[in-house]
Image: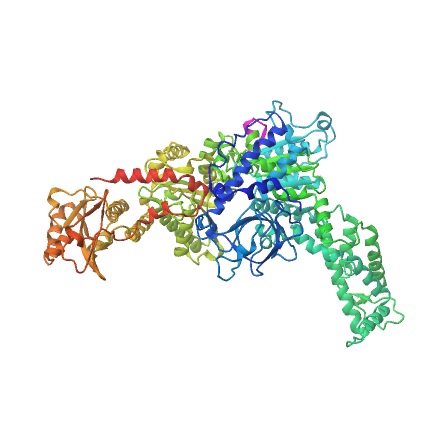
Amino acid sequence: MRIEGRDLIDLVLCWSLEEVLDVDLYKGQVGTIPTEFDSTSDYFKSFIPSLIEETHAALSSSIKTLWRSPVVEITYIAPTAEFELPNNLFYKVHLSTDESSLIPKDLIALTDKRPNRVDGFNITNEPYVVAIVCKADPDRPNVITILASKPLLLENLHQMRKNEKRESLFGVYMTNITTNVRIWHSLHLGLQGGNLNLLSTVLRRNNTDDDGVCVPCRFGESDGLVPSRFLNLNPSQEDAILSCLDVRRCRHGNTIKLIWGPPGTGKTKTTSILLFTLLNARCRTLTCTPTNVSVLEVASRVVKLVSKSLKIGSYGLGDVVLFGNGERMKIKERKDLVDFFIDERVDKLYPCFLPFYGWRACISSMIRLLEDPQGQYNQFLEKSKDNVSKSFQEYLPERFSELRKDLELAFSSLCTHLPTALLSTQAATRMYESIDLVKDATISEGVSGEGLKSILAVNGIGSDRVEDYYLKLLRLIPEISTLPGGCDRHLIRELCLGHACLLFSTASCSARLYTGQPIQLLVVDEAAQLKECETAIPLLLPGIQHSILIGDEKQLPAMVESQIALEAGFGRSLFERLAILKHKKYLLNIQYRMHPSISIFPNREFYGMQIQDAPTVKQRNYTKQYLPGKMYGPYSFINIAHGEEQYGQGRSLRNNVEVAVVSDIIANLLQVSERTKTRISVGVISPYKSQVMAIQEKIQETCSGGDAGGLFSLKIRSVDGFQGGEEDIIIVSTVRSNGIGRVGFLADRRRTNVLLTRARFCLWILGNEATMMNSKSVWRYLIQDARKRDCIYNVEEDESLARAIIDTAKIELDTPLNKSRWKVCFSDEFKKSVGEIKNPEMYRKIKSFLEKISQGWLHKEEESERDSLIKQSKIDDVLRLIWSVEIVKEEFEYNQVLKIWDVVPSSDAYEAVKSLKVHHMKYTGDEVEKCRARCISGDIVVPLRWSLESTSANGSDVMDETFGSPNLAAEMMTSEQPNDSLEDEKEEEDIEIDRLSHLLSSITL
């Protein structure tokens, strides 16, 4: 069995579990990918080590989270006919019918027990075998063919232990390596030759400043395509498109053009108009993007232009085709695109080419019915001898109506779904004409079947001319059509893909075109988000002469799993490399999205003031005031000085104070939308997935069920999820709040650029001003700019936000103590006093002190406190916390606990302590000693417990076991947890340093 990328697959299957988990397995073997190359061979070879390492990292990441991976039950497994030791270990596998199907290039672990942890295989020695899905049966999704890494000893896999019953075999999904296999194949195809015309032109810096058009073509006749005449382009957009059209006309050279589209400059509009113009020029063009989402977006824009330009029904839509993984595209949910998807198109066309029921058979049947209705009726009677027969008067109208509908469906399908290269304009016109001609036709009344000349009646009036002309059309259509008589699904697919003018897919899926008809021009949208080696997949397709890369290297790059590969430059795009080499870029220089107050900083910081604001965004009506106050103008940084960054799910950070602020702002905006009947779209962006999840949960809790009658829309996503998106209002939750300037991957300029350029009317940034100012990153410049423009506001300036923060602080005050070393009890007086505090910073200080003592912080006592059971601790210059160590009876033992009595002004602390001493007067001497007793372990104090029979806090009765469990944060830092985000994991070490530094700086002995 031939398998694409077999060398890479064999390498993956030979890795042991220890090798997969070894992050340094390929360290030192992955060289930096250069920016210039001496030959195409050097070019392709430079990516191979990084690709292997990236594949290794992806598998390592997936195997660490097997506990949450999908599992399929295997009901049958046996070697196939291709099975051959030692390498061709192919097996046919039947999955349980109710299991979700696996797809080719899925890596799975075969085992008789699903592991709960990553080391489940390694420590307990569970039998397992890694395999890859090679083939899936299209008619039976639960039947697959796999290639195993080692021979399967089925009796061992099915029988866990001696004398135990046989268990089922399971397949645990690990990851899918389709894209990496396709990259591997394209790199080796390049090494073997292939279409190297384009890549050979971009190996090194191009010092010439020509436009890529040879002299004969530059001075040749123009084809007259000037898109700006009817599609309202600005000069920079028009120049970019015309330059690309000029290149298309050149048949003698090979050129790669770059169109640089900063945020809001109409990149997608420019791309769609370029493609629409190429369609009109009959240039066979493939458009690729990095993701399914982006390919659907650009295809949707082009389809709208094409649909508006049609002149003959839906004839011409067949020139546009979309292909790829329909499930991942969720194509069924896209009503605007579902008919353009190749699988749907094949389904619609297949019935038209069936031998006895297709369009030709329908034409023949209609002709026979109109010319010889009696003969057709007699045949009907012969076929229905055993059934109840219809009269001639019943049969004829029913049969005519049935055939008319069949022909209408067949003709409509052919005109809609076939490329115009397969169906001429004349044939399409006649098909639609025939549909319209008999649309309202009926069978004439009183038809007897004898001496019949005309059976059709239009508008109740019989017409020989109508029938004669209709018969003439039906005979003419097959004569002017070049369509094959019968086609299977595969041939229909090849015809549609091979003759379409505009094709859309992801770069990875474009590999399916290697065996098809040649492509003339390649357009890569979002090219700066595509790894260069992945761009090689479409660039090597047969026939491609020119390519147009459209993107912005100042925004997010491609995602890379491996840190080693990332440092080698594996995530760099071809667009970025060419930009580094000073390749000419056509800049789209007018932005239509952002209010000038929003665009000014990213324009200066990232684009050197090369971008102009369009007149529309400078008009007065573009300034919106959704909420009262200067804080809610077009641009503001809302300083949250008392927020706290902490671990959320996995190793990702969250900031609950920012969650509360975001939630309150959203609630207020929703009320405005409902009250004023105003349409408002809001986007919330945070770089941390844990924060995204926390905000989503809070919004569901506080604003569930409200959408202002469909007028209010809300999207809460990570930075990656908002690339290319825009909303009326963007709220950014930066999360980081440590005062010492650590902002993690927020320091990435491209990530920051995306954050700051998604809003149309209002951009409100939530963050800690001191942290950002001390970060020595682009955020420092943002704070300096906001100060100069007087756009920084303290969150307490808004009473509603201040209340939200205080409410959150009240809820959270005892939450982190639930998993602490010491059990903590609060008095009613303390709860009352805390409820009267209105300053969020005071809450933070109280909470910080409680966290420390509940974790066993060795509190240094004043001389005057040592003999007193009641302690008073300084919170700040104003407040004192009154607390003590108490004992409580729980089941069969006494336990030490912390009792928090009150928080009072320093002037009232003496009286508070004095009044509470009465509480201990009822204690026995033994109980007082138990309260005084301290067990110091290292640099912490741990709570003690005694059996009920004990009478003393001394000697053997004192138990050295601690009460309670370790704090939650420590659990998350040491136990195996799934990584929410690759960036989150890379920050772990810095975050730990931040937390330790922050904690040490806050402790006062």
Image x and y of residue 564, in percent:
48, 35
Q: Nearer the viewer, residue 426 or 228?
A: 426
- Side (left or right) of 651 relative to 541: left
Look at the image and say whether residue 584 sits in the magenta stretch.
yes
| Residue extent of the magenta highlight | 579-588
Q: Nearer the viewer, residue 292 or 110?
A: 110
Q: Quadrant of residue 186?
A: top right
Q: Residue at 60%, 35% (x, y): give it.
A: 549
Q: Is residue 490 above or below residue 630?
A: below
x%, y% of residue 696?
42, 52
Q: Is residue 281 left or right of residue 625?
A: right
Determine the residue located farthest toward the front in the rendered image.
162
Of 636 and 807, the residue lying toward us: 807
Q: Residue furthest top?
A: 207
Farthest right residue in view: 451
In this view, the residue in front, 871 or 33, is: 33
* Tally of numbered tags: 0
Screen quadrant of the C terminus: top left
**Colour mode?**
rainbow
Residue 658 is inside the magenta segment: no
Is residue 934 at least partly visible in the picture?
yes
Name the residue rendered at 21%, 45% in the picture: 936
Across and down, in percent, residue 428 comes to 76, 51
Above or below, 279 against 811 in this view is above
Looking at the picture, how far across and down is residue 213, in whole percent?
68, 28
Can I make out residue 726 in this image? no
